[in-house]
Amino acid sequence: MFIETEDTPNPATLKFLPGRSVTGDARPVDFGDADVAAGRSELATALFGQPNVRRVFLGGDFVSVTKSDDISWGDLKPVVLGTITTFFESGRPVLSGTQVAPEHDVAPEDAEVVSRIQDLLDTRVRPAVAGDGGDIAFRGYKDGVVYLAMQGACSGCPSSRATLKHGVENMLRHYVPEVTSVEQVED
């Protein structure tokens, strides 16, 4: 099995492309630690079993791994590649059980605005962010403020705030005049 790797804007995160589906049609899943991954993904659990793996993000066709500052990618990359290869060669499913998207309280009068926001995020923002090994997740809307969570390589990336403020906020304000600002929230 050949797995390509790509750098991401976050120097602590590498994107691994196994050349096959990772989450398939399921939404991407971000695991901030081993406890969150336990029982939900054997692949993420296996990756967290490696020293210095701090975050695992499973996208449609890629895996992003964030390392601790204590180790170089030169030392960790072969271990991560071996873990991913071994996992996919086993034929086991990447995700266990049903993955449920978080519910968001949206006022009935905001439903149409939220629908337009989510459509723009899904069609214009998420594909670009996935190219960098991450995702952006809608977490709410209230009084003109859109709440978003950066995931995968984008979580903790030095440029994530600029991406939200200068890219996503400007686009949403242009297409959805009801939007006044975008705020980042942590998952």
Image (spheres, rainbow, N blue to C red):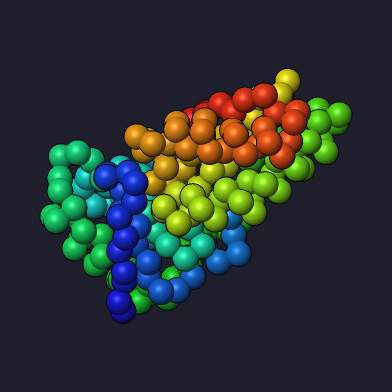
- Note whether residue 149 is visible: no
User: Residue furthest toward the front?
Assistant: 174
The picture quadrant where one finds residue 154 is: top left
In the displayed structure, does residue 101 sit left or right of residue 31? Answer: right
User: Residue furthest toward the top?
Assistant: 143
Q: Between residues 105 and 142, which one lies in front from this camera angle?
A: 142
In the displayed structure, does residue 4 sit left or right of residue 93? Answer: left
Q: Between residues 31 and 93, which one lies in front from this camera angle?
A: 31
Q: Residue at x 31, y 71 (%)?
A: 3
Residue 128 screen position, x and y as percent: 51, 53
Above-or-below relation of 80 to 135:
below
| Number of marks present in the image shown | 0
Above-or-below relation of 20 to 166:
below
Residue 181 screen position, x and y as percent: 62, 25
Q: Residue at x 71, y 48 (%)?
A: 119
Residue 44 screen position, x and y as percent: 39, 54
Above-or-below relation of 83 to 122:
below
Q: Residue at x 61, y 51 (%)?
A: 124
Q: Residue at x 55, y 66 (%)?
A: 24
Residue 150 screen position, x and y as percent: 48, 39
User: Residue furthest toward the bottom?
Assistant: 1
Q: Between residues 116 and 140, which one lies in front from this camera angle?
A: 116
